[in-house]
Image (cartoon, grey):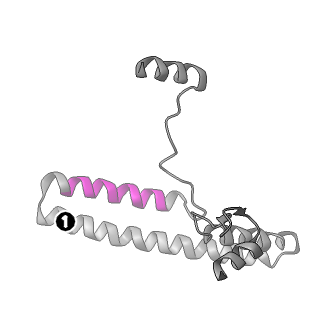
């Protein structure tokens, strides 16, 4: 029964590979990619050999990658800040602020709450009032 249902669902809906593991970030560049790639290689070497020299190489490479990432973030932040001074990019600040608010919003959300009477309350004022009760 399960097999038939799974095959039918796959035939109708299709199959996905899942979410992308490597998200694009606003500060990622080729220099960062190379540093992270090198760090991964050193890590694998250390895990395979399990030697003190391999650990020291990995540790040095890890610190270097952190520095590269930090400098890339700082460079991109300065670039974004200088763009905001241009008249054509001034609306970008509102887009960035809106994005920051969404990122800091609680995932579970409090879009609706059941009141004392059992009714679902969706407006913010009603939610506040129900919490005060």
Query: Is residue 4 inside the magenta stretch?
Result: no
Query: Is 51 rendered above or below residue 2?
Result: below
Q: Residue at x 42, y 18 (%)?
A: 1
Q: Is residue 83 in sight in this rendering?
A: no
For label 1, the crowd category at 10 Å Cα-Cα, with few meaning under 14, some 14 to 19 and many 20 or more, is some
20 displayed left or right of 81 = left
Q: Position of residue 78 (x, y in %)?
A: 65, 77
Label 1's element?
helix
Query: Is 118 rendered above or below residue 45?
Result: below
Q: Position of residue 120 (x, y in %)?
A: 70, 61
Q: Residue at x 37, y 70 (%)?
A: 64
Q: Residue at x 65, y 64 (%)?
A: 114
Q: Position of residue 103 (x, y in %)?
A: 62, 67
Q: Nearer the viewer, residue 2 or 56?
A: 2
Q: Main secondary structure of the magenta part?
A: helix
Q: Nearer the viewer, residue 43 or 2?
A: 2
The quarter of the rendered structure image containing the C terminus is: bottom right
Q: Residue at x 31, y 66 (%)?
A: 61
The residue that mark 1 highlights is 55
Using the rendered view, name the quadrant where residue 123 is placed: bottom right
Q: Nearer the viewer, residue 81 or 118?
A: 118
Q: In the image, which residues are magenta?
A: 32-46
85 displayed left or right of 121 = right
Q: Is residue 95 in sight in this rendering?
A: yes
100 displayed left or right of 34 = right
């Amino acid at each position: 029964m399960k097999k038939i249902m799974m095959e039918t669902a796959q035939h109708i809906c299709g199959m996905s590979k899942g979410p992308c593991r490597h998200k694009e970030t606003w500060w990622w560049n080729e220099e960062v990619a190379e540093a992270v790639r090198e760090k991964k290689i050193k890590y694998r070497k250390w895990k395979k050999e399990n030697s003190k020299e391999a650990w020291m190489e990995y540790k040095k490479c890890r610190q270097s990658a952190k520095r590269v990432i930090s400098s890339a973030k700082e460079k991109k932040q300065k670039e974004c800040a200088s763009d905001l001074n241009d008249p054509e990019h001034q609306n970008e600040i509102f887009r960035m602020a809106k994005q920051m608010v969404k990122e800091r919003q609680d995932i579970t959300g409090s879009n609706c709450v059941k009141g004392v009477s059992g009714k679902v309350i969706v407006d913010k004022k009603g939610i506040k009032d129900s919490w005060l009760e």
